[in-house]
Image (tube, rainbow, N blue to C red):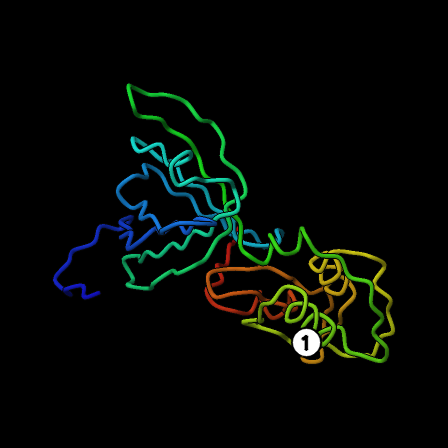
Amino acid sequence: IYYPMSINYTPKSIEIVSIILTPVSGSTVDLIYMFSELNIHEDMFGNGITASLVILDSLNLIKNTPIFGFEQVDIKFRTPSLDYFEHTFKLYNIENISLVKDRMQIYSLNMISFEVFTDRLTRIQKSYNGMLLSDVANDIQTNFLNSNFFELDTTQYLHQIVVPNWSPMETIRWCSNRSNSANYAGSNYMYYENKDGYHFAPIDKLVQTDPVMNYWV
């Protein structure tokens, strides 16, 4: 796709490139001309990126596609800085269905990252002997969530732990609360997802990373 550099952006403009729904069975559906609102939310204290789409539907996609709640949704857009955001979500809920006029209904599609969806279906019963907590987190992210870290900061001290039937993300968060950095003086790690991917990093590192705003009272 080619975008001419002559396009003028306003400070809050966002260019939606594509919103592709891939049903469990059947052909893909482009929702770019059917949505009226798109929300994408990053949370450093949450397990992953969440999103919601408000759809104006005159084709009765829920019945004709059909949409059950396990579909894949690929979203791509860019901001005035020309940075692209591409993310694959898993649809888990359809809500607020209402008829706005004849043959036109409106509803919300709620979505989560694939890793969060996998986490809700997975439990771990495994022991880790003499390992860094960063290596434990990496093993779980890779082998149980089928994902890779964008940022993984090495911890110090070897641990021996037994995971008692916890979910993968619950286990990684347990590790993050007990991690000490090999490169920074403080402890306490953050485990979160942003547009770049998943991070396992100490708070000391995050507060030194630009952009950081200083305030004086």
60 w.r.t. 180: above or below: above
Which image quadrant for residue 144? bottom right
Q: Which residue lies furthest to the left in this view?
A: 6
**Is 86 situated left or right of 182 in this image?**
left
Taking the spot 80% from the left edge, 79% from the top edge, the residue there is: 131
At a point 71% along the width and 74% down the height, the residue shown is 134
| SS category of the residue bearing label 1 | loop
Q: Residues within 10 Å of mark 1 (few under 14, many from 20)?
A: few
Q: In this view, does 41 lie above or below 58?
A: below
Between residue 202 and residue 195, name the one nearer to us. 195
Which residue: 85% across, 75% down?
A: 159
On screen, residue 40 above or below 213:
above
Decide which of 147, 42 is in the foreground and name it: 147
Where is residue 10 drawn, in percent x and y? 22, 50
Depth check: give the residue in front, 139 or 41: 139
Amino acid under disc 1:
Tyr
In the rendered structure, the answer to whether residue 8 lies left or right of residue 82 reads left
| Tally of marks | 1
Question: Is 81 or 207 nearer to us in this picture?
Answer: 81
**Residue position for label 1:** 184
Residue 85 left/right relative to 49: left
**Residue at 50 percent of width and 40 percent of height:** 68
Residue 167 horizontal/vertical position (percent): 74, 56
- Give the x, y percent position of residue 53: 41, 40
Quadrant holding the N terminus: bottom left
